[in-house]
Image (cartoon, rainbow, N blue to C red):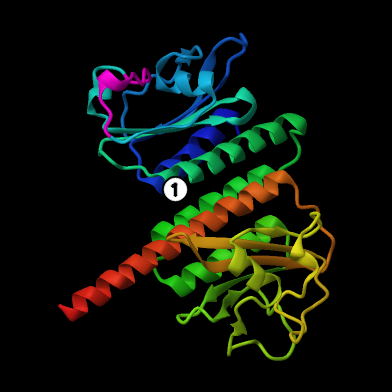
Amino acid sequence: MAEHLVNQQLLSIICNVFDAHSAVLFMPGEDGRTFRMAGCFSLSDKIVTDIAIAPGQGLAGWIIRNGEPLLINNFDQKRGVLGYYQNGEETRIRAFMGCPLENGMGALCLDSMRTYSFSAKDQKILHQFGQFIVSLDRERRQCATDGSCFTYYNALRAVQAMRLKTPRWSRFLDGFLEIVAKASGMTTCFLTVRGETGTHFHMEGATRPPMRGDTGAHGFAMGSGVIGWVFNNGVPVFSGERESPSRMPLFGRDVVTPPFTTIVCLPLLVHKKTRGVLVLADERSLNINDPLKEFLGLVADNLALFLENLYLRNRLTSQAGTE
């Protein structure tokens, strides 16, 4: 698959996640001085796809030159120029968000026709997409035959498609866990969620049981095991890292699990609180490299957004029932 087509399809995912009007990607041109449009996805047919910009040229050029993100939620032409539209299309844009790619590799930008479309949280997620794009490009350059990043990319597409087509939580979760387990190469993938009282957590779904005997239907005390540590600290855990709590029992000392050697625990933040922990485990010793970490971070963010939307929908339904 051609590089530009891969970028375009990845940008379509990004555009859908943020409900944006356009998503554009600038990366270094062959002359070493300018940055070409390496891909775009837009609801408009007025994007200039063959554009090349210099550092400092337009808002994307400002991001590249300064190496800093930019968020403008009440955009007009007095505040800057986008430069990648034609025939007056730019005058319809009301919000802009962009972030630099690491090591001066370019900029990833979104725009919208609605004011106040983007938030600081959105910008953090966009930054992670930018990291994934850089990793994808690096992996592609290092070894054209290595298909791991394309596997992650296809998995992201599948997750995005399920978000749009599978509104039922239980069906979405089962499919989500299978996709993530297969893409990551790990045998076990499951979700734990915080209980209503906040004193316990319980398992919501799994590709295969991560424990022997008692399935833990009653729940586990908050703070027990590696998973409880992640709930309390809101920090991801990857086995093999120094000063990592990954050597602790997964659920606590009293719960027997298979002899997992590889463990990944990712916090799912909803309204700044860890509402769930996505866990991947395998009895084999697997390499958790940067592209895999970034992929898992992105799917965890996707799951957190689904949980947040589900929480808001349930809250609105509850309020409507009391009126």
**Image vertical order of residue 115 relative to residue 209, above or below:** above
The residue lying furthest to the left in this view is 323
Relative horizontal placement of residue 18, taking residue 86 as reference (left or right): right
Q: Is residue 38 left or right of residue 146?
A: left
Mark 1 residue type: Lys
Which of the 4 image quadrants contains residue 210? bottom right
x and y, in percent, of residue 173 in the image: 51, 69
Residue drawn where x is 70% and y is 78% of the image = 251
Q: Identify the residue at horizontal 58%, vertical 15% (top origin).
A: 29
The magenta stretch is 74-85
Position of residue 201 relative to residue 75, above or below, is below
Which element is circle 1 on? helix
Residue 117 image offset from top left, x and y in percent: 31, 42
Q: Residue 111 placed where, x, y %?
A: 35, 33
| Residue 246: image location, x then y, percent | 76, 65
Residue position for label 1: 121
- Per the image, is 79 magenta? yes
